[in-house]
Image: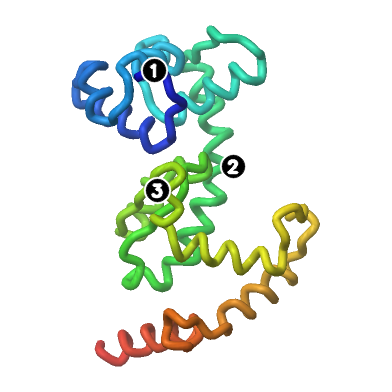
Amino acid sequence: MSYKQLTMKEQYQIEVLKKEGLSQRAIALNICVHHSTVSRELKRNSLDNNEYNVVNATVSARLRYQYKTKNRRLTKKHTSFIKKCMKEGWSAVTDAIVHLLKPIQAHTLTITSDNGKEFSYHEEVTEALNTEFYFANPYQSWQRGLNEHTNGLIREYFPKKMEFKNITDEQIVKVQNKLNHRPRKILGYKTPAEVFFDTITKSYAAV
């Protein structure tokens, strides 16, 4: 085995296992990568005090890319400022997820996302909604089957090469309503809206 690009899921695993006191070789065995991959990740993306976490790793990697240097390490001073800026941007995704799912929190059992950096604050979503948050494995789209299928339906209206910045909120809502009222074979040819509101209505009736 040789060095491989780590996913965010693997970076989170490194963070947790390092805090538990595991050696680099033990961490590598746990996440099924070569020990040189873990060593390189910790060497490149830890703070000066050897602290490692995913946010710091992401910032460090972006700084290296921006300044085209291999040896740019973050100090606490760097991180405290940049982490605040990153959180302000990524927290918008977090706030949107919580805002949309909070009213149906009782029916939100799990959330599974891809490995996008916008989900770095998934712990806040977990705490706010009291639900489990999972990351799909790379190139395993079947682990998020419904999401992938829905993406395909969305692409019928917004082709892949279309610039999303040119799409209005009104267009998005229009497509959203069409898909929510489109019968699905897997739902016995009911619409997602019918199934959703039937579920909500039954839960209130049982109270």
Q: Residue furthest top?
A: 71
Q: Residue furthest bottom?
A: 205
Circle 2: is it few (<14), some (14-19), or many (20+) Cα within 10 Å?
few
**83 relative position to 36: left or right:** right
Point out residue 112 in the picture as x, y percentages from the top left corner: 40, 55
Q: Is 135 rendered above or below residue 149?
A: above
Q: Which residue is mark 2?
A: 89
Q: Which residue is mark 3?
A: 136
Q: Residue furthest front?
A: 1
Circle 1: is it few (<14), some (14-19), or many (20+) Cα within 10 Å?
few
Secondary element under disc 3, as helix, strand or loop, is loop
The answer to which of 194 and 159 lies nearer the viewer is 159
**Mark closest to the chain's N terminus, 3 or 1:** 1
The answer to which of 186 and 101 lies nearer the viewer is 186
**Quadrant holding the N terminus:** top left
Residue type at tag 1:
Ser
Q: Tell us which disc is closer to us: 2 or 3.
A: 3
Q: Is residue 180 visible?
A: yes
Q: Which residue is mark 1?
A: 2
